[in-house]
Amino acid sequence: MAAAIVFAIISLSTLRLTDAQNVGFSVELIHRDSIKSPFYNPFETTFDRVTNAFRHSFSRVHRFYPNSITTMEANPDIIVNTGEYLMNISLGTPSFSVVALADTGSDLIWTQCSPCSQCFKQDAPLFDPTKSSTYRKMSCSSNSCENIQGGICASSTDTSCIYSVTYGDNSFSKGDIAYDTLTLGSTTGQAVALPDTIIGCGNNNAGTFSGKASGIIGLGGGEISLINQLGSPINGKFSYCLLPMTQIGKSSKMNFGSNAIVSGPGTVSTPLSEKSPTTFYFLTLKAISVGTQRIEFKGSSFGTDEGNIVIDLGTTLTLLPSDFYSQLESAMESQFNGIRAQGPKGFNLCYVAIHEFEAPEVTVHFANADVKLKTLNIFVNVDDSTACFAFSPAQNIAIYGNLAQMNFLIGYDTKSQTVSFKSTDCSKN
């Protein structure tokens, strides 16, 4: 990818968050299959894209299994080829454009850096920290280094903080923990700068990473995520409105601060559950109804009561424990009179969809919040004549995926510990 298409929306007018309180701004959130994305492949069919998204969901799900990664891997997570949405940022002074995957399932803001002793091949130029006047390494004696899992002293003579993470497929990343200015390009044209942002500068990385993106923007609940580093100006608030997959040429939006408040008629809110790991956003699922048939949720590996499901931006399908999923599929099959069809490998329930159809009403019953899904949340078109159920079994894991979130304005308030849902036409948001 040429440097010219590693895009960032930067303006001469820049708001420094250290100088502001209660700000509101929005940024583009670009689906990996959008024509604006470096991952975009014009030769891929809808079938190809949906099959890839299905595969990404199951590649990604392993991070959520207990004991699937070591404590040194648990936070941050930088599996850069399994996310679904991209953001544009700039690092350093002068600013250097980076395209990275937005990830609510990780905390560290991470990119490959030059010089690199071993890097996976990247289409865009590497970030060179020596060319940034605001870059400085973190001392390993700082509290921040101690709070980063995997953060250690470089050596007995080098007191800078370094990280080292290894994943189940033997992919790994090692590098420096540092501070630098991070700039977000807002949709209004006024850039938003965050001085002294904690970032990972990877200079020894290998494995199953993709060269189309330069790193990760961690949006999780941990201390070093972008949300927490943005601090008091956004008051712990962010939201997004995901466009349906049919609107591939447009960008969704992610909102921060006062722009992220979700309110008004039709808004429902459910508590966030505080539990470990703090990176993930845990909600409490009570039941799912198909038409008038309500199926009680008995829990998952995350718990049997509070905090039994994770809401995640980077997982496509909604994944549910196998026993519960079987009941849900049976309820859908019994109430839907469509003609069965063969879908991609891994999709259990598919129908002929030559014409638009209305699926039976599905309501997701979170604690204190009933979220009524539309057909586009329940079924995904895998080609011009077939639609498949957008839910899937996954042993004992429960993840609320992004297909179920499309055309909803979804707001996170980490101060009041709530997530709010409002049915919305995201193309007009």
Image: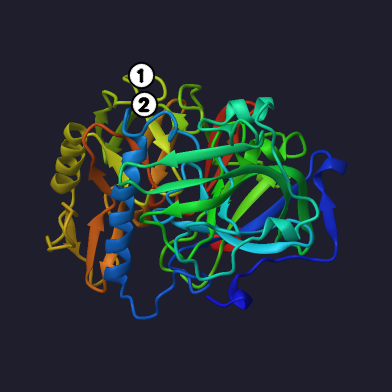
Q: Position of residue 241 (x, y in %)?
A: 54, 53
| Residue 70 picture location, percent across and down | 38, 31
Q: Residue furthest right?
A: 19
Number of residues whose C-alpha sits closer than 10 Å to that of mark 1, classed few (under 14), some (14–19) or many (20 or more): some
Please tell me whether mark 1 sits on a helix, a strand or a loop.
loop
- Which amino acid type is shown beneath numbered disc 1? Asp
Who's the residue at 32% across and 28% down the image?
67
Gap between marks 2 and 1 measured at Cα: 6 Å
Amino acid on which the number 2 mark rests in the picture: Asn
Q: Mark 1 points at which residue?
A: 305
Q: Quadrant of residue 224?
A: top right
Q: Position of residue 8 (x, y in %)?
A: 67, 66
Task: Give the class, few, some or many, for how many residues have Cα within 10 Å of label 2's Cα (few <14, many ≥20).
Answer: many
Q: In x, y percent, where is residue 312?
A: 44, 42
**In front: 236, or 214?**
214
Question: Can residue 84 be seen here?
Answer: yes
The residue shown at (37%, 49%) is: 171
Label 2, on which residue?
A: 308
Q: Is residue 395 left or right of residue 226?
A: left
Residue 407 position (above or below residue 262)? below
Q: What element carries label 2?
A: loop
Residue under the point 17% across and 53% down: 349
Look at the image and tell me in which quarter the C terminus lies.
bottom right
- In which image quadrant can residue 340 be found? bottom left
Verify CB contact (< 8 Å) between mark 2 and mark 1: yes
